[in-house]
Amino acid sequence: MSTQFPDWTPSGIIPAVLLPFDAELKIDEDSFRGHLRDVTSVDGISAITLNAHSTEVHACTLDEQRRVLSIGLEEAGDRLPVISGVYADGSAEAARIARMATERGASALLVFPSYTLAMDGYMRPEMAIAHFQHIADASDLPIILFNYPLSSNVGYTFETLLAIFEKVPSVCAMKDWCNDGRLHERHVRTFQSLPRPVNVLSTHSAWLMSSLVMGCAGALSGAGSVIADLQVALFSAIQKRDLARAMRVNDRIYPLAQAFYAPPFLDMHNRMKELLVILGKLPCAAVRPPLSKLSESEINRLRAAARDAGILAK
């Protein structure tokens, strides 16, 4: 295992960082380093994630993913575990990405579902299991399974999740985006109580306080690229069972969550980039197509939400 955090199990508040581009849509490495330093300066975060939705991994080549990981490790790898996403439809390619991340020094893998399984893949759970086995065979790193809503057609059923956890021991955590409060609580209560526990990390950032109160082991969220300090404060208050403090923190998170996760949902990280420009933390909010720039009216709504949250002067 090529990591200096060999005994780390994914837990706590884990921001998924953003990836700045310049006006020509090339990676802005200087701004990315500044963003990494800003996020990792927040006391209390437990790791960072890159090569994920928040860094627009869908629009990055494998060479760019290597570079993103290298920069992340240079800026934070000596202080924090760095989680690298595995985003690929084919199992062989997923294994190649996992091997690359392992060799370069990542501390864990965040494995996205294969969209090959979108065509009734839930009827063949052995395919999902085999996908994870291919990745585990290529890397000895801890794996965080990214669980999508069943309505996405690439989510895993409760029974399939249990089978993956049993057959692929390196899966030690799950980034849960089932988007169903009842099912989410079942995941937390069941998976964290298995003989070999699997930590449930919330990514229900639109209703994070409610999710964390259910007993999640932490949160892995793109919103941490902007409000990691508030997420740390919320998680800490809930861990200490300080409801009054948690509610006060959540009152500040609420306007931002409403703005970030409004329809269309796919603009969430686009909005986070725009807010960092508003806050003077990024020079440019460029996103790669098919994502496109927000309207001025929506940028104004973000500005108002930031004022309501107390992170931008009124």
Image (tube, rainbow, N blue to C red):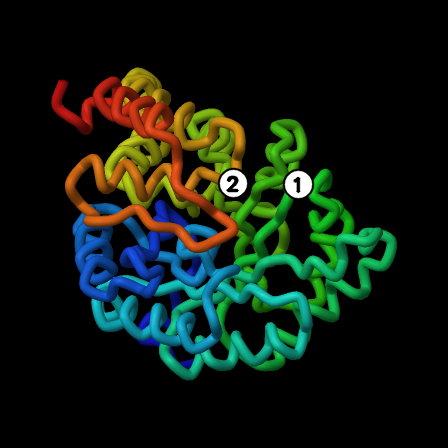
| Residue identified by numbered label 1 | 149
Q: Marks 2 and 1: CB-CB under 8 Å?
A: no
In the figure, is residue 181 to the left or right of 304?
right
Residue type at mark 1 is Pro
Residue 264, position as x, y percentages in the image: 53, 32
Q: What is the secondary structure assignment of the residue under circle 1?
A: loop
Name the residue: 62% across, 55% down: 195
Give the total of numbered labels.
2
Q: What is the secondary structure assignment of the residue under circle 2?
A: helix
Q: Residues within 10 Å of mark 2 (few under 14, many from 20)?
A: few
Q: Residues within 10 Å of mark 1 (few under 14, many from 20)?
A: some
CA gap between label 2 and label 1 equals: 15 Å
Residue situated furthest left in the rendering: 313
| Quarter of the rendering occupied by the C terminus | top left
Residue type at mark 2 is Leu
| For residue 11, above or below residue 214 | below
Residue 216, position as x, y percentages in the image: 48, 39
Q: Decide which of 286, 126 is in the foreground and name it.
A: 286
Residue 1, position as x, y percentages in the image: 43, 81
Name the residue: 82% across, 53% down: 119
* Residue 206, label in figure: none
Name the residue: 81% across, 55% down: 121
In the figure, is residue 209 to the left or right of 70?
right
Q: Is residue 218 visible?
A: no
Q: Decide which of 66, 234 is in the foreground and name it.
A: 66
Q: Earlier in the sequence, mark 2 or mark 1?
A: 1
Residue 192, position as x, y percentages in the image: 56, 46
Q: Quadrant of residue 70?
A: bottom left
In the figure, is residue 241 to the left or right of 189?
left
| For residue 121, above or below residue 168 | above
| Residue identified by numbered label 2 | 266
